[in-house]
Image (cartoon, rainbow, N blue to C red):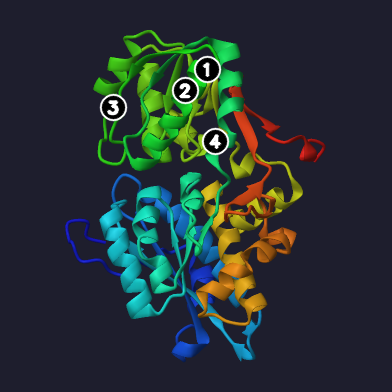
Amino acid sequence: MNRSTRTTRPFRLPLLAAATALAFASAGVHAQDTIKIGFSGPLSGGAALYGKNVLSGMQMAAAEINAKPLEIGGKRYKVEIVALDDKYNPSETGINVQRLVQQYQTATVLVPHSGGVFATQAFNEKSKVLLLAYTSLPQVTERGNKLTVRIPPDYTTYIPSFIKTVMARYGKNVAMAQGDHDYGKAWSASFKPAWEAAGGKVVAENPMSYNKAADFYSGVSRVTQAKPDVLFIGGASEPTGLVAKQARELGFKGGFIVLDQAKLDEMAKVTGGYAALEGAVGVMPVSGDERPEAVAFTARFHKLNPGKDPSSEISLNYSAVHAAVAAMKLAGTTTDAVAIRAQMDKAFRTLPKEYNPNDIEGLDSKGGTIANTIVATVENGKLKGQFLRAKNAAQ
């Protein structure tokens, strides 16, 4: 795609030739026999890898669904993912989603960033479109939007564990150098008072434009001059990894608290391994999750994508597409967003384990997923995990 153009076109991400062919071979013969699920996210710019990971998970699910007969309301269907690039710009998200609804007649759309989610929530109920929101911001479901499902668990559940883990190992002085996007602002607004309530001190604050900058030396240098024990960082994985790498190059030897948007395994590819991330705490990568469903999902993904590990953006949005189509089957409709939304909790609860590698247990009363997430720490250059809730501790 030409990044200089302002014209937004459907984006087709090649997951793997065979899988893509399987996903789309039968789509579109008759428009009424195709379920179009929309996507608006960053497919160019600094957060492109993040958006492409989300999209590849959706396409992997579509390929699997299309490999078997799908009947809803007495008709046979195939699933097509229609993807538009919004460059992480909420105003473009709003335009894209309206285009998806009007031009492609999508009853369900997935948006993977909070700014775009809020822009879509301004009209999705009126437009009768189900919004699958890939953001862990609790505000997304607290607003009472009746046609929104939040895919990741609420990020505030991570904060106490993150703070306890890193503060005990490194100390009480933290410098905040997270992304300056909406998600980073929300995370920092929750993290800062929690850190201070735990007896910690914020010694420096310098949010940075993770999605625009390609060099963070000046910003990182500014906060490391305050001699923090811990750096609070996070945005898309690649720039977050670069922030961590440059912090080490500038002599920082403390720990990292990593927003859940950034993935430790993808950061390690930027830093040259986990050694540079020693002391980091974040969410366990899917490839490090030892639960049987996650192991099986990782193996299937590896067959389609040799040499690449699946991220939680891939696995969670893979499950979201499977659940959305399952909800359509339960509701007996592919077009009534209200009826589909009403079945989403049951769809997640009854989703076959092979399609649920993150062990989503259903939706809470506000429409957010419930799952037992694993917190990961980097110790001696290796990932170590601990469940946030005890119920799956023996798995």
The residue where tag 2 is placed is 193
Residue type highlighted by circle 3: Phe
Is the C-beta separation of discs 1 and 2 under 8 Å? yes
Label 4: state its secondary structure: helix
Where does the image place residue 253, in percent across and percent down from the top left? 46, 12
The residue where tag 4 is placed is 156
> From mark 1 to mark 2, how far is it between C-alphas?
6 Å
Q: Quadrant of the image for the N terminus? A: bottom left
Name the residue at the right extreme: 394
The mark found on residue 60 in the picture is: none
Q: Residue at x 55, y 53 (%)?
A: 151
The residue where tag 1 is placed is 197
Where does the image place residue 169, in percent across and percent down from the top left? 59, 12
The residue where tag 3 is placed is 216
Is the C-beta separation of discs 3 and 2 under 8 Å? no
Q: How many marks?
A: 4
**Along the line of sight, the residue nearer the viewer: 142 or 337:** 142
Q: Mark 3 vs mark 2: give the one in front.
A: 2
Residue type highlighted by circle 2: Pro
Q: Quadrant of residue 270?
A: top left
Lower sequence index among marks 1 and 4 = 4
Q: Mark 4 vs mark 3: give the one in front.
A: 4
> From mark 4 to mark 2, how far is it between C-alphas?
12 Å
Say if 189 sits above or below 322 in the image: above
Q: Quadrant of the image for the C terminus? A: top right
> From mark 4 to mark 3, how far is it between C-alphas?
27 Å
**Along the line of sight, the residue nearer the viewer: 347 or 37:** 347
> From mark 1 to mark 3, how far is it between C-alphas?
29 Å
Q: Quadrant of residue 235?
A: top left
Lower sequence index among marks 3 and 2 = 2
Label 3: state its secondary structure: loop
Residue type highlighted by circle 1: Ala
